[in-house]
Image (spheres, rainbow, N blue to C red):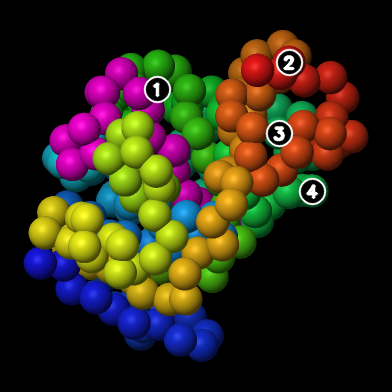
Amino acid sequence: MAQVLIWRGPVDDRILDPALPTLQEGGVIACPTETYYALAVDAFQESALHRLLQLKKRPRSKGLLVLLADLQMLDLVAAEVPSLAQRLMAQFWPGPLTLILKARPDLPKALTGGDNTIGVRVSSHPLAQHLPQMYGRPVTGTSANLSGQAPMISASQIEQELGAQIDLILKNSPCGGGLPSTILNITCKPPLLVRAGAVSLEHLEECIGVIRGL
């Protein structure tokens, strides 16, 4: 059964001490974000990625988005960051906007789904931002649910539904819920709205111009 780590107040490395060995050893962590709980594993560890895909019953052809601590971490996963993406990051990060960028060729196929793209974001939730910062590299940010099912907003839901299959639950007040992160593919011209979400199409177009809708 998963260990539950209760967090209140400011986030620092001491609070997240149990998370470091969990990630290093290929473990799965349920981490709150500003929208829903995410399942975090080391984004570069093949065995952990395969375990996560199996847990979620997610097809291997579908990539896994990653959570970054900051813009400097982009170089670890993205082959290039176009000016349009930079403008969006400046306006909407940290926040619920996932950008699909051209991936570095050396990323695990389990992370990209065999595609040459990668979904990235910097969350505005202090735990979801501090976890990759403390770990020093990106972690996955896929929703905490079985593929096709509704994402979860509370640690109690996670414990009941996934507690036997994961290693650590970071418990805070329930996530905001509502709309998920917006997903925008910047590798397309014009950019393609892959999933509508918390950042509206109107606000995105105010920032970068025309976007292809769903």
The residue shown at (16%, 67%) is 2
Q: Pointer 1: residues within 10 angstroms few (<14), some, or many (20+)?
A: some
Location of residue 170 with respect to 198 vertically, above or below: below
N-terminal of the two: label 2 or label 1? Answer: 1
Q: Name the residue under label 3.
A: 85
State the quadrant of the C terminus: top right
Q: Name the residue under label 1.
A: 105
Location of residue 108 with respect to 45 vertically, above or below: above
N-terminal of the two: label 4 or label 2? Answer: 4
Q: Mark 2 points at which residue?
A: 212
Q: What element carries label 1?
A: loop
Q: Is mark 4 on a helix, strand or loop?
A: helix
State the quadrant of the N terminus: bottom left
Q: Does the magenta stretch include residue 40?
A: no
Q: Pointer 4: residues within 10 angstroms few (<14), some, or many (20+)?
A: few
Location of residue 11 with respect to 19 vertically, above or below: below
N-terminal of the two: label 1 or label 3? Answer: 3
Q: What element carries label 3?
A: helix
N-terminal of the two: label 2 or label 3? Answer: 3
N-terminal of the two: label 1 or label 4? Answer: 4
Residue type at the position of mark 1: Pro
